[in-house]
Image: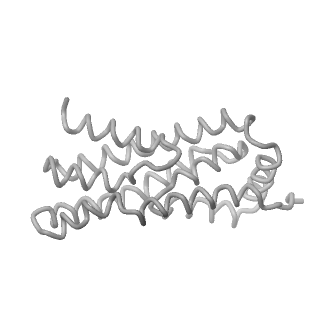
Amino acid sequence: MSSYLLAGLVILLANVMPAFAPPTWSILVYFVFREHMNPALLVLIGVTCATLGRGGLALAFRKISPMLPRGYVANLERLGSRVNTDSRSARGLLLLFFVSPITSAQLFEAAGIIKQVALKPLLFVFALGRILSYSFYVSGARALSSTSLGALISREMTSPQAIALQVTFIVGLVALGNVKWKAQT
């Protein structure tokens, strides 16, 4: 199997996972270190597969939202109605998806639950933001691949701190759905 195809498949699967998947940038860095791939093509594959994966994750949460607690979904739906009626909130949401934190799974899970939030604009700004961030990581990894700092970065990808960050974002998603958002009038 081609290294590019393998990279794309790994990135797609990691971005469909709701939690505990390695961040895409770390997968890209891994392939730069191990396979010495074309950086521009690798970034393009990374952005495409990450965007498709996050879209799939959001759609999966749209399907399972009826199985979630009604109060939780209702709270998120009220938040969604605020975003849809307030242009500042809508712009803020797009900005959040553009510069989202290292992990974006929980953002897309929430967007999937909030049915009135359009996914296409979120996926578009997510892809734009990832073009910038993945380019930064891949070019940096390419420069560091022959140094001992590269080995240090490789070890830190699965650190307890990275796992703790994932748990923190999951707790944040649960907390977001438990806030009693007021309906926008």
Q: Is residue 25 above or below residue 5?
A: below
Task: Return the x and y of residue 35 as percentages of the image width and height.
Answer: 15, 47
Q: Residue furthest left?
A: 146
User: Quadrant location of the N terminus?
Assistant: top left
User: Hey, which quadrant is residue 183 in on the image?
Assistant: bottom right
Task: Return the x and y of residue 100 as percentages of the image width and height.
Answer: 50, 62
Q: Residue furthest top?
A: 1
Residue drawn at point x = 18 percent, y = 33 percent? 2
Task: Return the x and y of residue 124 as percentages of the image width and height.
Answer: 50, 49
Residue drawn at point x = 32 percent, y = 55 percent? 26
Residue 6 is left or right of residue 76, and the answer is left
Residue drawn at point x = 15 percent, y = 50 percent? 34
Task: Return the x and y of residue 153 as percentages of the image width and height.
Answer: 25, 65
Q: Is residue 168 above or below residue 4?
A: below
User: Quadrant location of the C terminus?
Assistant: bottom right
In this view of the protein, which residue sits in the foreground, 73 or 168? 168
